[in-house]
């Protein structure tokens, strides 16, 4: 069983923010922003490439609720999902990073030439 399935099943602890029948949101263990929350579907889906439109529609509303709860709905935020090896996905259970609480740097999303990657 993957690590996020264990969190969903309460087999390992998490700093939970929000939960409903379909999704759970908890604070990232190694935050990269003042607010860094992970949104995870309770049913295991490996990655964004495999997610259904139905699940995404529900997850959109859940993510929006997370941004309201953390107060970043008005100030802005970044929503990221890493997909597969080249995308840098480490946990192979679909999750969205909801990051905000400060003006976020662009890092590798800036105008770095591709040849340097
Ligand atoms: P990714 O590289 O997109 O797969 O991101 C995985 C994220 O999960 C990283 O930001 C980790 O810090 C986070 N993470 C891993 N294990 C835990 C955990 N037990 N509780 C909270 N966050 C975790």
Image (tube, helix red, strand yellow):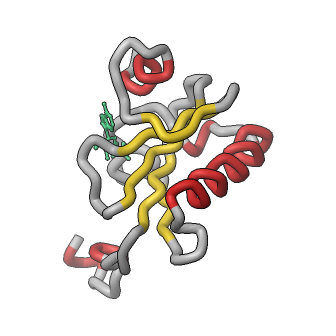
Percent of width and height locating residue 59: 67, 45
**Quarter of the image where one finds residue 104:** bottom left
* Residue at image location 34% in from the left, 83% down from the top: 110
In the image, residue 100 sits, relative to residue 60, either above or below, namely below
* Residue at image location 62% in from the left, 37% down from the top: 50
Count of numbered badges drawn on the protein: 0
Camera-nearest residue between 84 and 41: 41
**In this rendering, would 62 be left or right of 67?**
right
**Quarter of the image where one finds residue 23:** top right
**Quarter of the image where one finds residue 101:** bottom left
Camera-nearest residue between 113 and 9: 9
In the image, residue 63 sits, relative to residue 25, either above or below, namely below
Q: Quadrant of ligand 1?
A: top left
In the image, residue 76 sits, relative to residue 57, either above or below, namely below
Percent of width and height locating residue 55: 72, 38
* Residue at image location 61% in from the left, 23% down from the top: 43
Residue that protrudes farthest toward the bottom in the picture: 111
Camera-nearest residue between 41 and 83: 41
Percent of width and height locating residue 1: 41, 13
Percent of width and height locating residue 69: 57, 54
In the image, residue 43 sits, relative to residue 30, either above or below, namely above
* Residue at image location 28% in from the left, 59% down from the top: 32
**In this rendering, would 92 be left or right of 61?**
left
**In this rendering, would 11 be left or right of 46?**
left
The quadrant of the rendering that contains the C terminus is bottom left
């Amino acid at each position: 069983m993957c690590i996020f399935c264990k969190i969903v099943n309460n087999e390992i602890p998490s700093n939970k923010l929000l939960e409903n029948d379909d999704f759970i949101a908890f604070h990232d263990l190694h935050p990269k922003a003042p607010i860094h929350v992970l949104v995870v579907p309770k049913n295991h889906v490996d990655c964004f490439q495999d997610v259904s439109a139905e699940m995404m529609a529900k997850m959109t509303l859940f993510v929006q609720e997370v941004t309201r709860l953390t107060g970043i709905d008005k100030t802005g935020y970044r929503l990221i999902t890493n997909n597969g090896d080249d995308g840098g996905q480490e946990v192979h259970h679909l999750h969205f990073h909801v990051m905000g609480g400060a003006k976020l740097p662009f890092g590798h999303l800036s105008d770095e030439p591709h040849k340097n990657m």
